[in-house]
Amino acid sequence: MKLTFECLDTTDAAACAAYERAFYAAFSRVTGNRLIRALWQWDDARGRLATRIPYEDQLVFVGRDARGRIETVIATNVALREFQSAAFGFAPPAEAAGCCEFLTFFTVSDFRLGVKLRFWEACFAELRRRGLYIACATTAARLLPIYRRLGGEVLAETVVEREARYFLRFSLDRHWMRVRKSESAERRATTGE
């Protein structure tokens, strides 16, 4: 699936509503997780979900499918006036210049790694273009190996309500998402993949 990359117009109520419905759809299977329920603003009656960070402080990157539907999202807190990770006891960076916070990353239905990686690369490039070079985020233990493999560095960890949470830092300058054709060909030649 090829996605069309865009930065969501967060001043457009209809665009935000569509994003919040996609956000809800992506996380609807974890509605019983108390940490997630407390972290974000759930509107079960309308099937919408939002972070607690005001939209004016966010850049929301959206990947749309060929029909224009939201397929994947990375929402970032670029102002850092409020810090979502503080809900788990993590402090914002001492030096906020050049930093942002990933608020959510989700995919609605296309879970192929290549699609996600291309989307992440586009998001990282746009954040770098805007003068940002470090991103912070939190994750649960289940996703930690994936984020570590993608370059996430664990800065701290805590346990909240018997669930481990990790505070990560990503370098937005790192190009870990690209697999060079020569590396791919070499891997196929040596492993038969």
Image (cartoon, rainbow, N blue to C red):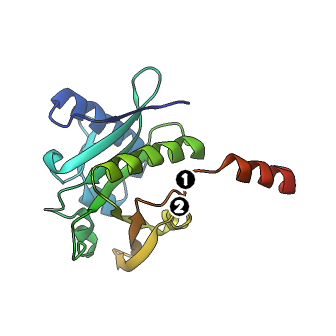
- The residue carrying pointer 2 sits among few (fewer than 14), some (14 to 19) or many (20 or more) residues within 10 Å by Cα, namely some
Q: Residue at x 14, y 34 (%)?
A: 11
SS state under label 1: loop
The image shows residue 174 at horizontal and vertical percentages of 48, 61
The image shows residue 146 at horizontal and vertical percentages of 54, 61
Mark 2–mark 1 Cα distance, whole angstroms, equals 7 Å
The image quarter containing residue 10 is top left
Whichever of callouts 2 and 1 sits on the residue coming sooner in the sequence is: 2
According to the picture, the residue beneath numbered tag 2 turns out to be: 150
* Residue 112 shows in this picture: no
Closer to us: 149 or 183: 183
Q: Amino acid at mark 2?
A: Leu
Q: Residue at x 26, y 63 (%)?
A: 98
Residue 185, above or below 63: below
The image shows residue 193 at horizontal and vertical percentages of 81, 49
Closer to us: 111 or 59: 59
Q: Residue at x 78, y 54 (%)?
A: 187
Pair 2/1: label in front: 1
The image quarter containing residue 157 is bottom left
